[in-house]
Amino acid sequence: MALSKIKTGSIEDTIDLTANDGTFTGNITATTGIGVIQVTSTQVTATGSFTTASTSYVTDSTMPTLNITPSSASSKIMIIFRIGMQHDASGQIENTIYRNSTTDLSNGNTYGLSFSGGAQPGWFNNTITWVDAPTTVGEVRYTWYSRAESPVDITPVHPGTTWSAILMELP
C-alpha cells in the first residue's frame, strides 16, 4: 500500500508504507512544517522463546530490535516498543532499551518497566517509550533487553507472543 504527496497549505509530505509478510515499514519525508522526519516500524510474532536467569541485561534474536538512520546529527529518535511477556511466578522481569547494544537508555533505572506476579504466573503487555539523541547520521539499532531481578528463571518471550517497534526521527 502506498500513499504519496499529501499537500496541506505550504506543507508537502510524502508517506510510503510497504507491507511484506505481515511486517509494515514506513517512511515520512517532510519538506516543511511537520514534526516527524521519518518513521520505521515492524510487528513480529515470536516463533521461539527466550528464558534467562541473568541479573544483567541480556537479549537474543526473539527480542524486539529495529534500525533507523537519522538524517541529521541533531535529530531525536522517539522509540516505542511493545512486547507481550510472561513471568514464571517467582521472578521479576526488568526491561530497558539499548542503543547499538552498548548504551542502556534507562541508565539502570527500570522503575515502571518491571513486573512480578507473586505466587501465580502472569501475562503482561509491556511498553517502553523513550526519546533518544544519538548524535549521528549513521545507522542506529535499538534493541529490547531484559533481566531477572534475582537469579531465577524468567521468560520474557514465548512462542506466539507479538511485539512491535516504532522509531520516529524528530527534528
Image (cartoon, rainbow, N blue to C red):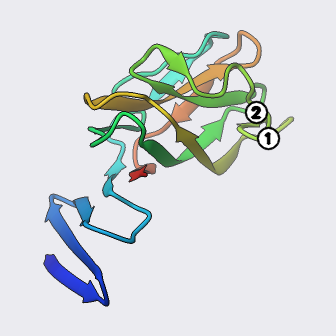
Q: Residue furthest front?
A: 10
- Residue 109 in the image: x percent, y percent? 75, 25
Residue sitting at 34 percent across and 30 percent down?
A: 141
In the picture, the disc for residue 120 is 1
Q: Which mark is residue 167?
A: none
Rendered location of residue 19, percent (x, y): 16, 65
Quadrant containing the N terminus is bottom left
Q: Label 2 is placed on what type of residue? A: Ala
The residue labelled by disc 2 is: 89
Helix, strand or loop at disc 1?
A: loop
Residue at left 42%, top 17%? 101
Residue 121 located left or right of residue 134 = right
Q: Which residue is drawn at the image coordinates 40% and 61% (left, top)?
A: 36
Residue 151 at x, y = what percent?
71, 9
Residue type marked 1 = Gln
Of mark 2 and mark 1, the one earlier in the sequence is: 2
When the figure is inspected, residue 119 is found, relative to residue 52, above or below; the finding is below
Residue nearer the viewer, 120 or 26: 26
Question: Where 153 sits versus 160, above or below?
Answer: above
